[in-house]
Structures are given as structure tokens and as C-alpha cells.
Image (cartoon, grey):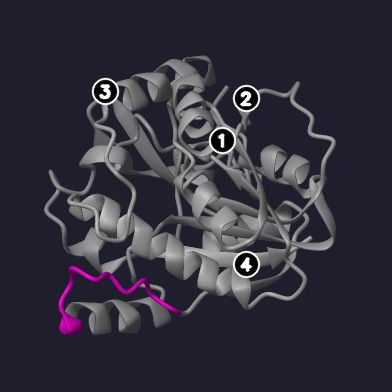
Amino acid sequence: MPQTCIICQNPDSLLKYVIDSFEIVQCTRCKLIYLKNPVSVDKDTETYDHYFEESTVLEYRCDSASPAMRTLWAINEQRLDWIDRLQGVTSILDTGSGRGHFMAHAASRGYRVQGIEISPIAALYSEKTYGLKPYVLNLDHSAWHIEDTFDLITMWHVLEHLSDPITVLKKLGNCLKPHGRLIVEVPNINSIKFRLARPQQKWVGGNHPRHHRFFFSHHSLKNMLLKSGFHEPVFVKDAYCIPDYSHVTNLLKRCCRRLHRDAFLTLIVRR
């Protein structure tokens, strides 16, 4: 049976890209772009354990010797500036918490934090390095349940990896306090960077369909969140200011963000 669109249940799609053996298609009705033949979710834990096992552990600091870590620190600092401006947020659940850098950064700002992480290797690093012990589970598995509730749930580059994101979003909604918020950030398939990249450069690294199952525009991201029972969607208009980038580059990023053409889309919704 052909896979149907998860948002509008339309079975009809148009082929947009073929990368290796992966077929990326677009729904003919609501325009969601998704992977037609994804890797089984049963392999996800193994995939991310391998990633964290193989990737180099670098010092997470604003003045780290690693440009990647300096950038991540600056991005998390700005994410928390956004969160500071939200009313009534004292507790955060970070899904896909990885090695725990965002959790630790949020804890240093005084937030009560908890995480969800699929990789036991990454979760152990978080516990040993920061004393923060996330729930270790696969969001795409149906059996998980969390008793605690939070003012805010963050999904930094998680949604595009999921097999059944609407089911997961509905379950996460139950982990929010009344009037709680969810922040979702995903790569933007309509970004200037993606559109101008050469074909062989579009799918380098984590954007490869071996890892991503959905490819969002600002329209399809908003539609998915509304379909999942959230409301009052607001896109964050502030682009990340990266210290190692030039003033002109950061200015261009800010303009692209306001036109929904930056590399990332960040959406805040209410329960």
C-alpha cells in the first residue's frame, strides 16, 4: 500500500528528489515533502549510538577551540534569550537532548530541566558531565509515558527525524502544563542556502534522507503543528547571530529569516 501524506491523508505525491536509493516526494494536496521509503525506526537507536560513539567530544564553551562548539553555545544562548521573554516558563523538557549541552545551559539560567534522548551513549555523557539524567527512549515507540509536566517543551532539530511526528506531538502535548508552549526548530527546505546549493551539496551530513524523514517549509511546519492540536503559531523572526560570521552575513541571515528563507525555521505554539 502506498504511503499517504501524514497531514492530509492524500495518497498522491510527486517525486521531487532521488538520493542514493531514497525517494523524496511532495504531497499533491498540502505540499508536505516527505521520504517515501524511510529506514525502519527499529534502527534509530543504533544509528544515533553510532553517531555519538564516532563523533568527537568537544568542549562546550563560548570560547571553545572548536568553531562548531562556539556556534552551538551562541545559538543556545540566543534560544534561551527567546525563552526568557516568554511568560511563566520555569521548567523545560528538551527532546533529543543529545549530550546535554542545551539542558546544562538552561539549568545555568535557573530553569528546571529534563531531557529525552534516544541514544544511551549520549544520555550517559549528559549524566556524567552535567549531572543531568534524561529519559532514554525512542519517541516513535508507542509505549513511552512521562508523568511530569512542563511549562515548555523544546524540539531542536528533532521533528524531521520522526516516523510519526503527529502522534509524537500529541503525546508531547500531554506533557505540557495548561497553556504550556512548544518550540520546534527544523531545517528549511525553502531556504536560500538549500535552493542555491549544488545537487551534491544539498544532502551533505545530517540533511541526508538516511536521517531525515520530513522536509519542511514554513507552511507545512505550521500545518503539522495545527493538525497535532496546537494553536497560536508564531514564527521566531530573529535569526541566530553567529560570532564567527561577518556582520554582512548575519544581516543577510536576519533578512532571510523574516522572509522564511533562512536555513532554519523556528515555530512557537501553545497547547
Circles 4 and 2: CB atoms closer than 8 Å = no
Mark closest to the chain's N terminus, 4 or 2? 2
Label 3 Cα crowd, 10 Å radius (few <14 / some 14-19 / many 20+): few
* Magenta part, dominant SS: loop
Label 4 Cα crowd, 10 Å radius (few <14 / some 14-19 / many 20+): many
SS for dot 1: loop
Label ID, residue 268: 4
- Between the residue at mark 2 and the residue at mark 1, the CA separation in whole angstroms equals 18 Å
Query: Where is the N terminus found, in terms of image quarters?
Result: top right
Q: Along the line of sight, which residue is nearer the eye, 229 or 66? A: 66
The residue carrying mark 3 is 54
Circles 2 and 1: CB atoms closer than 8 Å = no
Q: Which residues are magenta?
A: 238-248
Label ID, residue 131: 1
The residue carrying mark 2 is 137
Query: Which quadrant of the structure image shows residue 52?
Result: top left
Q: Nearer the viewer, mark 1 or mark 3?
A: 1
Tell whether position 245 is magenta: yes
